Amino acid sequence: ENYHALLAENRKLFNEIQDLRGNIRVFCRIRPFLPGQKEKKTSVEHIGENGELVVADRSKPGKEGHRLFKFNKVYGSDATQAEVYADTQPLIRSVLDGYNVCICAYGQTGSGKTYTMTGPNQATKENWGVNYRALNDLFDISQCRKGSITYEIGVQMVEIYNEQSFVCLDLHTLGIMTHSQPNGLAVPDASMHPVESTSDVIKLMGIGFKNRAVSATALNERSSRSHSVVTVHVRGKDLKTGSALIGNLHLVDLAGSERVDRSEVTGDRLKEAQHINKSLSSLGDVIFALAQKSPHVPYRNSKLTQVLQSSLGGQAKTLMFVQLNPDASSFSESLSTLKFAERAAGVELGAAKSNK
Ligand code: ADP
């Protein structure tokens, strides 16, 4: 009942939040404890039906450590990939109507970003992440519309590491012809690969992720310290009117958001940490500026926000998955993740602490 009282108290605030959000949606997903981790304490106290989340700092007694957050959705650890995708689908489908869409996953390393975006290693269709489901959906719908609109779909994969972008799908290793130059190409040297089916995509992404993994071992688990951006270009032609429809979809697995103790790292690791901080905070600043309807949106401050510019702001639709590790020992990282998310969405509950 405590929570209900608390929520009633904040209802007015919540309504204002919904208005503020504009085109930015934030879905929070809590990953399950992994096998062998079962006995651990969780920092998740309560998940409400309307996107409320209460987390608890277990080092504090009783309700003292409770904090309330509010997002568009919160998925508990039992949510399936299909359930998560069902809520994402309308955004994906709008790409075929000419919208630009950005879907990104934010959180500390190990919180399930890759699981949500791509799926587990050796994913089967059942546990495919958003990437494969999205492409599958785009093909299905474009097939259904074949009589009135013809679509060309292309995929590109880029990794952003230390403010530089690297193309993960290389034309030479693949031997595939590039498509005509897509519009709004933010990474000039990246290649766009035409795809016609989900199996093309699985093949291409497999190669792209492998390329990413190769550089990861070479550079000391670089994958958690770089941003992976899959871009899907959709170009439709209305057969009756001849008019063109162009939509871009960015699917982004962000670098781990964990704070690196500066007193403990030097050299390359320090440089990496600074680049990650800079790019994630730039992303937060851009989303915050958009949520506030600020006249100046600081896209130029990082490579990441430059690459994503076409799908952030304007008519574009943005969805951020905020990923949490449920372990009580990760509480401080979870809290900073949640604070990032609530600021990005332009929503700071401030006084709405659940220990009142
Ligand atoms: P990140 O990309 O944030 O570093 P991962 O996606 O690699 O994290 O997830 C860490 C581990 O947790 C992986 O073994 C992954 O398969 C597992 N995992 C994450 N989310 C889920 C989930 N919802 N259900 C089952 N396993 C998950």
Image: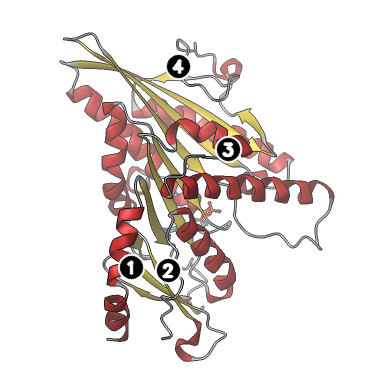
Disc assigned to residue 304: 3
Q: For marks 1 and 4, give the one nearer the viewer.
A: 1
Earlier sequence position, callout 1 versus callout 4: 1
Going 49% across and 26% down the picture, which residue do you hit?
156
Residue 353 placement (x, y as % from top left)? 43, 78
- Distance from Cα at disc 3 to Cα at disc 4: 19 Å
Amino acid type, mark 4: Pro
Residue 172 placement (x, y as % from top left)? 60, 15
Disc assigned to residue 286: none
Q: Residues within 10 Å of mark 1 (few under 14, many from 20)?
A: some
Q: Secondary structure at mark 3?
A: helix
Q: Which quadrant is home to the C terminus?
A: bottom left
Seen as rendered, the residue at the extreme right is: 267
Residue hosting label 2: 349
Q: For marks 2 and 3, give the one nearer the viewer.
A: 2
Q: Residues within 10 Å of mark 3 (few under 14, many from 20)?
A: many
Earlier sequence position, callout 3 versus callout 1: 1
Residue hosting label 4: 182
Earlier sequence position, callout 3 versus callout 4: 4
Q: Secondary structure at mark 2?
A: loop
Disc assigned to residue 13: 1
Between 12 and 87, the residue placed more toward the observer is 12
Is residue 343 found left or right of 151 in the rendered image? right
Going 51% across and 40% down the picture, which residue do you hit?
297
Earlier sequence position, callout 2 versus callout 3: 3
- Distance from Cα at disc 3 to Cα at disc 1: 32 Å
Residue 339 placement (x, y as % from top left)? 51, 63
Amino acid type, mark 2: Leu
Earlier sequence position, callout 2 versus callout 4: 4
